[in-house]
Image (cartoon, rainbow, N blue to C red):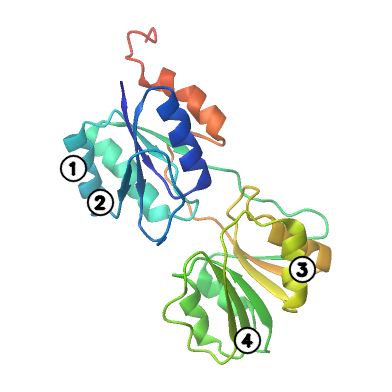
Amino acid sequence: MKKILILGGTTEARQLAGKLAAADHSVTLSLAGRTENPVAQGVPIRSGGFGGAEGLAAYLRETRIDLLIDATHPYAAQISANASEAAGKTGVRILALRRPGWAPVEGDRWTLVDSVADALNALGPSPRRAFLALGRQEVAAFEAAPQHHYLIRSVDPVEPKLAVPDATYLLARGPFRGADERALLESHRVDVVISKNSGGEATYGKIAAARALGIEVVMIRRPALPDVTSAETVESLAAMIDHFLEPAAERGV
């Protein structure tokens, strides 16, 4: 039985963990601990950080992990960098699950930016009604532009709330249907959506809704990630794993 550590936090990480556990691998799923009440994962969970690349390397050695899988969010660039470095330090094999990003299609009004700070600047000086489709750790930056109305949706409460005069908070966990997202944007009279290019179907509804309503989307580009062997889907990564774990002699190398 091979020991696999999955760095998770995504729906795909949970799906992959279940699939590998069903194939008689010993799977541990690591979560950063940022979500207060994560959904049930179905495999043993480790919660919290490792202490950088060195801490992760120590964990890999101590627990004798055979395979490290980076299935973190596409914007968890530091965790991905730590994973790649720790794998290099220990000789543990590493794979990554990286879902494709969204691409603009006809009718989209995307403004591409590189960071949350750039997204804030893209709002401009005149008051707007902005839907912040971001993590709760990132919305505090928008206190620097208190002239806007903010619609903020998060899985856990934003605490402390933003020091702005006009903000609405919603607690919800995806997936979000396109029709519901359109109704949300219309009812709150949103005129701009601030989003990361997370990819996948679970949160694409707001992008489709913005397109249908002619609303601008300020899209934060993905960060650069380490160059490791990767797959785009749970199924394709699962198909790679048994071959990846085979000793070189068995693979005919």
Answer whether labels 1 and 2 touch (C-beta < 8 Å).
yes
Q: Which residue is mark 2?
A: 50
Q: Nearer the viewer, mark 3 or mark 4?
A: 3
Q: Residue 4 at x, y = what percent? A: 33, 32
User: Which residue shows up at 72% across the image and 70% down it?
Assistant: 184
Q: Residue 203 at x, y = what percent? A: 63, 55
Classify mark 4: residues with Cα within 10 Å, few (<14), some (14-19) or many (20+): many
Q: Which residue is mark 4?
A: 148
What amino acid does circle 1 point to?
Answer: Ala
Question: Which mark, residue 58?
Answer: 1
Which picture quadrant has residue 213? Answer: bottom right
Instruction: Describe the element under mark 3 as helix, strand or loop.
Output: helix
Of residues 40 and 149, the one drawn nearer to the viewer in this rendering: 40
Task: State left or right for residue 3 relative to residue 142.
Answer: left
Q: Which residue is mark 3?
A: 183
Q: How many marks?
A: 4
Which picture quadrant has residue 1? Answer: top left
Whichever of callouts 4 and 1 sits on the residue coming sooner in the sequence is 1
Whichever of callouts 2 and 4 sits on the residue coming sooner in the sequence is 2
Whichever of callouts 3 and 1 sits on the residue coming sooner in the sequence is 1
What amino acid does circle 4 point to?
Answer: His
Q: Nearer the viewer, mark 3 or mark 2?
A: 3
Disc 3 to disc 4, C-alpha distance: 21 Å
Task: Reply above or below: 167 against 194.
Answer: below
